[in-house]
Image (cartoon, grey):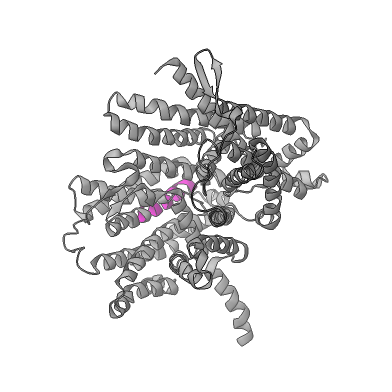
Amino acid sequence: MTFALILEQLFNGFQTGVTLFLIAAGLTLVLGIMDFVNLAHGSQVMIGAYAATVLTALTGNFYLGVLLAIPVTFLFGIVLELVIIRHLYRRDHMEQVLATFGLILFFNEAVRIGFGPGALFFNLPQSLSGFVQVMPDMPYPAFRFSVIWVGLACAILIGLFVARTRIGAMVRAGASNPEMTAALGINIRLLFRLIFAAGATFAGLAGMMLGPLTAVEPGMGEGLLILSLVVIIIGGIGSVRGAFIAAVIVGIVDTMGRVLLPVILRSFMDQAAADGAGPALASMAVYILMAVVLVFRPTGLFPPRG
Amino acid sequence: MQQIKGWFTAAPLLWLIVLLFALFPIYTTLADLPFWNDVAMRIMLLGMAAMGLNLVLGYGGMVSFGHAAFIGIGAYVTGIANFYGLDNGWIQIALALGICAVTGMIIGFLSLRTSGIYFIMITLAFAQMLYFFFVSLEQFGGDDGMVMNRSDFVFIDLWAPLSLYYMIVAALALTALLLCVLVHSRFGVTLRALKSNQSRVEAMGLNALRFRITAYMISAMICGLAGALFANWQEYVSPDIMHWTRSGELMIVIVLGGLATLAGPLLGAVVFFLLEEFLPEILAHILPAYAENWLLVFGLFLIAVVMFGRGGLIGVSQKLRARFGKGAG
């Protein structure tokens, strides 16, 4: 286990972290402001990935495909909010969990009908399929590297938007007291719709960036959904800053755990058992982290409500 | 005597369904449909687990999104005991109940510090933790799970036709009785009171946490019993049994039937699995090309249940009866 390898895994962890943040940002705002649990947020990831794949195939250009897929996912978010989601705001959390669970089933099957049950694969453009020299003697896949940059750029954009703009101030006000915000004459319904669609777009973007790394297939967003729920709980519901910090922590713990735990286990188990148990124990580590945080800080690390 | 009669008359629908399950093999034997016995056993086991969850979710107002973990513990305790040659079914069930009680107590104690959405998520986190724990146990098959033999229940030969079936019916009836007694006891009343107003109950000098943890433990044990029997029925144990979607399934079953009703979870389980069995067939008649995609229809059905069917099947039927019953009378 060399230094370069550990550094590379740190990069991978960071890349997973920023991707998770893109999914978690929308989720935490939707839950924080609208008090709405959206399990179907993972489906937005899938829809983003499919939109980008199809549009890339149609236009023959990856960048153009992604650029066109972004408004598609935004529109999709608006329509979903109008048709289903807005009727569920006043329901309790469990009913929201069930209805959005139903949405997951619906979207997965709809995608299966439309695009077949198998996985689709992306062909990366030449400019993104090589390696970049992050440091001397440390090549790193160019695509992963650009995912980190796009993720960071989005994080800064979301952070500045929420902290510095007028609409951002409404969003923060909505997160800490929705009734009062509405009473001050802010069109909270429109605000809700825009936040929901923006969250859907960022989740879709995460899907577009994950597509080339994993596979574009029905149900691809579900594992990520659970992980991003962990992220927003650790970060404190409604806090974008908390979501970012928690996403990076979760990404690094998960990735490093996958690499380091088998090595540690090998020192006292036989290799096959260690290689089998390592990844599962790494997955456990994330949930242990969350449980520990909740036991000591029952509303997460950075709760936005005063 | 009056008391005992009360337990049964409190939930006539629940006992009717239990009775129907007990009589069901007569039909399957006469019609020669042994496959349906298997379906019935699965419905009873998941209905039983849902009844256990309903104690905390419906009556206690604690939305646990991780009860599949206890089904998994029950199943794995049975499987692992068998693996090491401890194949006495009664001891296995006792072990499963004990371990579920202890884990239920620990998880309940830690989770009940939080509330609302945080409670939903922390229970999910513990379930995921246990899920990945069992995935990591390579010697017990890891991801793939392990095949096991049915346990040895000393006086009962599980290989005799229908003996497992009636064992499950007995467990279901016991669970039903336990819940009928509990819900109408002082304990059950306190639990429901806590759901509607915690501070008032605490002002009366009762310890809220103790009641909640007890309810959590009991429901964990019921799920554990279902899991132990599930392992015997399936003759196979895998982490799949405790996937987070299973916890969602239990919640669906409860909400479908009727939250905080005695018969609701079991009724919900029957309807849920009949849909699962028949939706593909119905679709095959109407739209043969899409028979495999029945989950699409099922997803829409779920959304419709939440949007229009408040109170579940029981709630809707009561509303209908209230509306049309008056007109007739």
B100 vs B94, left or right, is right
Residue B311, by quadrant, is bottom right
Against B269, residue A256 (above or below) is above
Q: Which residue is depicted at the point 34% across and 42% down?
A: B134
Q: Position of residue B315 (x, y in %)?
A: 56, 69
A94 vs B134, left or right, is right
In the image, which residues are magenta? B208-222
Main secondary structure of the magenta stretch: helix
Magenta stretch contains residue A300: no
Front residue of A196/B280: it is B280
Q: In this orientation, does residue A246 appear?
A: no
Quarter holding the N terminus of chain A is top left
Q: Which residue is depicted at the point 82% across and 44% down?
A: A184
Residue A154, by quadrant, is top right
Quarter holding the C terminus of chain A is top right
Q: Position of residue B37 (x, y in %)?
A: 32, 69
